[in-house]
């Protein structure tokens, strides 16, 4: 991803805000689409590598069984065996919104971006991407030094995306962040129970991080990742009150615990369609 985008930090806010845009280079967009499709295969189909990558690359020569196995990894994107990417419901029956494709795209971009720009986290949950329509926290990562308890942080990520007005998500994001400390408790318990390593500091952090979230500890961070189209004029600011949620969580100048990351993709919907086409989904 580093070959295709560049980031800029916005100063003067009560939370960190970074905006990533596509580099203005020849063929950047085409190369980004191909690389994004490759990352989808590597991450969503990791258990079937390397054979599944060969199916993707040589689709016309693949058998029917190989194609069915390949498509089953992204089955949640389909409605009646057709991929419909229509989050605004403009081309669907009334009140029929097909949001799984756009949501899956953005969640995968966050995972790709974190692996490209940040040190390898000590833990990612889920370790491989999966559909997130079950109410769980979208993405969790623990960073720091495994033998240094004070260096460890857990970031709870909420992922959104939009083809139109990003601010439509504001109130929902705030509600979800308020609920995150409660939702995280059982996940933290499972992560602690499943850890079999010998790092005492890391093991202690896993045992304590559910309580830390409930008690608004500064080692618990909250991240919002949003992908949207910069060609669409935005009528309102995106989550200007991000740092106020959950209530009573530490805020600057003492601590910087909230992070907003924006991925700006011109003609966002068209690019998604090209990725789906590259993946043989449409």
Image: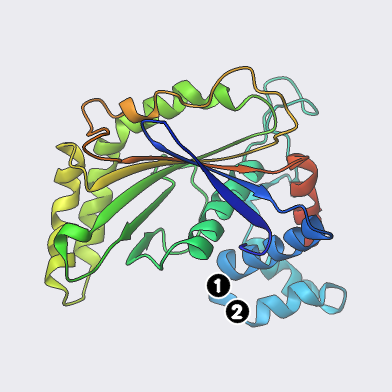
Q: Secondary structure at mark 2?
A: loop
Q: Position of residue 91 (x, y in %)?
A: 80, 28
Rounded to the nearest angstrom, the CA distance separating label 1 from label 2 is 5 Å
Furthest residue in direction top, as rendered: 235
Q: Residues within 10 Å of mark 1 (few under 14, many from 20)?
A: some
Q: Is residue 281 visible?
A: no
> Would residue 58 appear left or right of 40 to someone viewing this image?
right
Residue located beneath label 2 in the image: 49
Q: Position of residue 65 (x, y in %)?
A: 74, 74
Task: Identify the disc placed on residue 123.
Answer: none
Q: Is residue 200 visible?
A: yes
Q: Position of residue 158 (x, y in %)?
A: 44, 40
- State whether residue 199 is above or below residue 206: below
The foreground one among 73 and 248 is: 248
The residue drawn where x is 55% and y is 72% is: 46
Q: Splitting the image into 4 quarters, where does residue 108 fall? A: bottom right
Furthest residue in direction front, as rendered: 12
Label 1 close to label 2 by CB (< 8 Å): yes
- State whether residue 33 is above or below residue 201: above
> Would residue 229 appear left or right of 250 to someone viewing this image?
right
Q: Secondary structure at mark 1?
A: helix
Q: Position of residue 145 (x, y in %)?
A: 24, 68
Number of numbered markers: 2
> Would residue 264 appear left or right of 186 to someone viewing this image?
right
- State whether residue 199 is above or below residue 220: below
The foreground one among 278 and 199 is: 199
Q: Residues within 10 Å of mark 2 (few under 14, many from 20)?
A: few
> Would residue 268 appear left or right of 206 to someone viewing this image?
right
The residue drawn where x is 79% and y is 61% is: 278
Task: Identify the disc placed on residue 46.
Answer: 1
């Amino acid at each position: 991803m580093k070959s295709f985008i560049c980031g800029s930090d916005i100063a003067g806010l009560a939370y960190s805000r970074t905006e990533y845009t596509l580099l203005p280079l020849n063929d950047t967009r085409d190369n980004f689409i191909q690389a994004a499709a490759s990352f989808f295969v590597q991450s969503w189909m990791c258990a079937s590598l390397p054979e599944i990558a060969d199916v993707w690359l040589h689709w016309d020569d693949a058998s029917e069984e190989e194609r069915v196995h390949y498509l089953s990894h992204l089955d949640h994107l389909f409605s009646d065996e057709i991929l419909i990417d229509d989050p605004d419901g403009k081309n669907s029956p009334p009140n029929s919104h097909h949001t799984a494709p756009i949501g899956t795209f953005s969640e995968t971009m966050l995972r790709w971006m974190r692996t490209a720009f940040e040190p390898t986290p000590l833990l990612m949950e889920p370790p491989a991407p999966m559909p997130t329509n079950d109410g769980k926290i979208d993405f969790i990562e623990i960073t720091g030094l495994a033998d240094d308890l004070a260096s460890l942080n857990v970031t709870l990520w909420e992922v959104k995306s939009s083809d139109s007005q990003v601010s439509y998500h504001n109130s929902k994001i705030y509600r979800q962040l308020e609920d995150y400390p409660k939702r995280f408790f059982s996940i933290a318990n499972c992560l602690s129970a499943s850890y079999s390593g010998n790092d005492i500091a890391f093991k202690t952090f896993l045992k304590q991080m559910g309580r830390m979230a409930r008690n608004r500890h500064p080692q618990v961070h909250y991240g919002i990742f949003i992908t949207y189209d910069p060609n669409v004029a935005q009528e309102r600011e995106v989550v200007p009150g991000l740092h106020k949620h959950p209530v009573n969580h530490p805020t600057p100048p003492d601590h910087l615990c909230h992070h907003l990351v924006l991925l700006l993709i011109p003609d966002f919907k068209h690019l998604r369609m090209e990725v789906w086409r590259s993946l043989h989904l449409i």
